Amino acid sequence: MNYSILDLFCLIGAVGLFLYGMKVMSEGLQKAAGDRLRNILGAMTRNRFTGTLTGFFITALIQSSSASTVMVVSFVNAGLMTLAQSMAVIMGANVGTTFTAWVIALFGFKVDISAFALPLIGLAIPLLFSSKSRNKSIGEFMVGFAFLFMGLSLISKYVPDLQSNPEMFAFLQQYTSLGFGSVLIFTLVGLVVTMIIQSSAATFAITLIMCSKGWITFDLACAIVLGSNIGTTITPILAAMSGNVAAKRTAMGHFLFNFLGTIWTLAVFYPFVNLNCWITEAIGQGDPESLFSFVNQLHVTAPDIYDHLFDGSLPQGHETLAKVLQMQVSVSFGLSMFHTVFNLINLSIMIWMTNIYVRIVEWLIPAKRKDDEEFQLKFISGGLLSASELNITQAEKELYVYAERVQRMLTMARDLVHTRDGSDEFVKLYSRLEKYEDISDRMEIEIARYLNRCAEGRLSNEGKRHIAGMLHIVSEIESIADCCMGAGKILLRKQQAGVTFTDGIYHNLDSMFDLADSAMQNMLLLLKNIENANMADINASYNKEREINNLRNQLRSANVENINNKHYEYQAGIYYMDLVSDIEKTGDYIVNVVDSIKAEYTHAPQVA
């Protein structure tokens, strides 16, 4: 086997194309169909059983568990699917991949999805030049999808061609008589080979060749299939490398599902292999263990026939060739049966442990911060609405979660004021603020959409009032997020202009932020118990707003005097006042939220 340095670089390029396709596909999904697709996927994965069926049918349809799990990773990365939903789909995909093994065993063909990649790009190009941003996003998604599968295909093409060079595995014969140690060694072989060639189907073919030549017994072939089950998880792990923490957790969940399944199977390995041999014989496909002994006996008693058997020179009607072919079918069926029974039992055990899986992967891959940059609604699901009055309570809880997230943006804006201009920390913090602003926009749309759907149901007058109030509140909270992002943009312009602030300016900005943060805390207190809004807290919010306005007026007057006295440059004063005005606006939006709570949740007269 010749494998050049050029082949190695082609392999690296194929992995790069795969990762880039994953990134483009995920971003296109977010921009094109975030809310709609989330609702569709929510309906498909409403519980662990429908999620499992979804994974099974998708994998059976496209005949690639790697492809379906990569799609799941991209959905999670785009915030369209939760971690718990993805676990159920992945469990179904593992059973779905056995359908592929049966298709290959029975008919000998497999769908090549990469064949559709170029036509898909052809369809996507006109959309990329469309004037509508939604069409452009759909075009990006299609291009990313095509790149992803082209990358998968090229990875398979440029990995070392082990399938055509089975002689490489002849040395493994010396490790076949170590008892259970041999089982562990060949499980590791299956894992490594599948990781390298990125195809459990190719590993299956290599295993069949090794059985046919009498190198390994059927039980060791089963061990290789068991290892390949873990090795196939490398593809979604590669895909998750460019994703967020949720995507990495999904890939880890896939690995964990297959790894733990392998552990329990190894614990009962020999009885489990015997069970599958019995099932294969019971369905009339012969004993899959007979090929090893027959070929080895042939090697001793008729070495010439053995040599001709594997160099392809035996005539088609030869009795030995026909017998070996029949036994190969038995082995093929036996391995497919082993794979299927393993995955079915694994699924029937693990499906009840979905929530435990989620907790384990969250522990194994903790978020960088308490709040990782991922889009998710905590209390509102994408399923069908049942009782609108009850769903109002869910929306009220979601409002509080939304406001909490926006409060973090206020803290980020404050931290950005004190971050050194031009530093990596400034760039990271500004990017994080942008990410939160994007999430804030999407949360506003989803909550408002949910409230509008609630409003379509049969509601009491009080329920209608509450929905009207919440629609106003969600808009005002989003405006607070806009102000926080606005502060970041002002600081970016200040940095580009090379302007510096004095210690006095920093001190005054901190005073403004202190008041805004205090007002925000008060607003959160009201939102947390919105049904029982306290008039003392409402009045406290109005007082905070007055304090913010008074300080803004004082700082404005002092700014003119400080510029005249040359305490700082005129341009510094401009950016300083822009920030003061921006922070003051957050106070206005906070008090607007309080007004809505007072108007719709209390019966006290509203203050003008």
Image (spheres, rainbow, N blue to C red):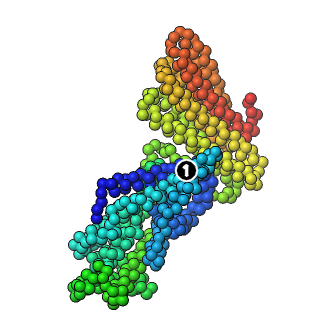
The C terminus lies in quadrant: top right
Is residue 347 visible in the rendered structure shown here? no
x and y percentages locating residue 533 in the rendered image: 67, 39
Percent x, y of residue 441: 61, 42
**Nearer the observer, 389 or 154:** 154
Residue that carries the numbered disc 1 in the rendered image: 140
At mark 1, the secondary structure is helix
Would residue 280 be seen by someone viewing this image from the given angle? yes
* Residue located 58% across and 21% down the image: 577
113 relative to 77, above or below: below
Residue 171 place in picture, x, y as percent = 23, 70
Q: Nearer the viewer, residue 31 or 139?
A: 139
Task: Decide: is 69 above or below 164.
Answer: above
Q: Position of residue 327 (x, y in %)?
A: 36, 84
Residue found 47% across the figure and 56% down from its top: 148
Question: What amino acid is found at the position of numbered circle 1 in the picture?
Answer: Glu
